[in-house]
Image: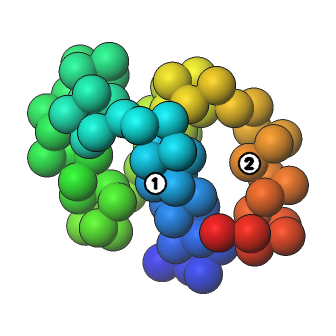
Amino acid sequence: MSDKYIALIAILKKLRLSLGLSQKDVSELMKKPQSYISKIENLNQELSVNDLFVLLLIYKQSASQVMRILEGDNC
């Protein structure tokens, strides 16, 4: 896994926590098991592009907003 992918996952986790959402909350919105979110956040499962965009919708972020954060490595 690349450093940028690891940073992206850290950003997504930080966004989730900043919204006060648990892994269970997110998994229910995605209609996935809670373990799926846990595996992604613990880097045991790769995040699909489709699920990335679902998470961005849940977290009320655009891809460009997250890319700006990622490029600045503000995580």
Q: Which residue is drawn at 32% across and 22% down?
A: 30
Q: Which colour scheme is used?
A: rainbow
| Residue type indicated by callout 1 | Lys
- Check disc 1 and report the residue beneath it: 13
Q: How crowded is mark 1: few (under 14 residues within 10 Å), some or many (20 or more)?
A: many
C-alpha span from label 2 to label 1: 12 Å
Q: How many marks?
A: 2
**64 lies left or right of 31:** right
Question: Residue 57 in the image: x percent, y percent?
Answer: 58, 22
Figure check: 48 above or below 57: below
- x, y percent for residue 36: 21, 44
Q: What residue type is labelled 2?
A: Val
| Residue 64 coordinates in the image, percent (x, y) | 84, 41
Tell me, yes or no, if residue 53 can be seen here: no
Residue under the image location 33 percent in, 68 percent down: 43
**Nearer the observer, 41 or 17:** 17
Structural crowding at the residue carrying mark 2, measured as other residues with C-alpha within 10 Å and reported as few (<14), some (14–19) or many (≥20): some
- 15 on left or right of 26: right
14 lies above or below 35? below
Q: Could you tell me which quadrant the C terminus lies in?
A: bottom right
Q: In which quarter of the image is residue 31?
A: top left
Residue beneath label 2, please? 66
Can residue 36 be seen here? The reply is yes
Q: In this view, does 45 lie above or below 63?
A: below
Frontmost residue, 20 versus 32:
20
User: Which sits earlier in the primary sequence, circle 2 or circle 1?
Assistant: 1
Residue at 69 percent across and 32 percent down: it is: 61
